[in-house]
Amino acid sequence: MAESDTPLLIKRYASRRLYNTETSDYVTLEDIAGFIRAGREVKIVDLKSGDDLTRQYLLQIIAEHESRGENVLPLGVLTDLVRSYTTQAQSVVPQFLQVSFDMLRDSQNKMLDNMTKPMAAMPGFEAMRAQQQAFLKAMTGGWMPEHGKDGESEELADIKKQLAELQEKLAKMNE
């Protein structure tokens, strides 16, 4: 599925069936997970009330994968998330998680850059690079982002600093 700037609109009917407004057909949670893995943003709304249900369904997708033994979230992280809903840490946790995932994406981009720069002069390099990206995308379930921008080192340093500050705040709250 091609990436788009506008989210894919999924409508939930009263029967709880999910309807893809672009293709005019019904979809499952696994279909929605596939759209997301392919890089597409989704928005799920209740047809009758207009309520945004995206967060609820994304959490359901994660819960189903975790219950099938596809454990991505360590038990300690899940425990800390539950605790964050009852402490003052709840205001820091979303920012901490966002910064952590941004850093992971940046690191993956830099790794790809570092692997490809020395080989750029080789004949057939572009074909090899496309094959490598397809392999990494398949191995990461489509979560691997595309090539990053140049000049991210200052931004990465700033993110690391912010992450360290957030970790320090969380440590103080847990004392």
Image (spheres, helix red, strand yellow):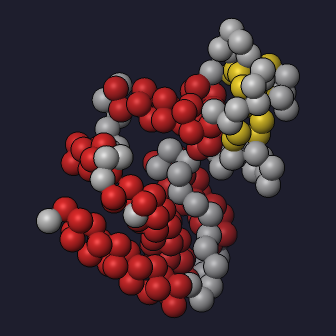
Which quadrant, please, contains the N terminus? Answer: top right
Q: Residue furthest left?
A: 175
Q: Nearer the viewer, residue 3 or 175?
A: 175
Residue 74: x and y in percent read 26, 46
The residue drawn where x is 51% and y is 90% is: 154
Q: Nearer the viewer, residue 86 or 50?
A: 86
Residue 113: x and y in percent read 54, 77
Q: Nearer the viewer, residue 28 or 171?
A: 171
The residue drawn where x is 49% and y is 29% is: 60
Left or right of 50: which side holds 164?
left
Mark yes or no: residue 144 visible. Answer: yes
Q: Is residue 38 above or below residue 45?
A: below
Left or right of 32: which side holds 84?
left
Q: Is residue 76 above or below residue 71?
A: below
The residue drawn where x is 36% and y is 32% is: 66
Q: Is residue 48 above or below residue 134?
A: above
Count of all numbered marks drawn on residues in the image: 0
Mark yes or no: residue 121 visible. Answer: no
Q: Nearer the viewer, residue 132 or 83?
A: 83
Q: Is residue 106 above or below residue 40?
A: below
Residue 67: x and y in percent read 34, 26
Q: Residue furthest top?
A: 15
Residue 58: x and y in percent read 54, 36
Which quadrant, please, contains the C terminus? Answer: bottom left
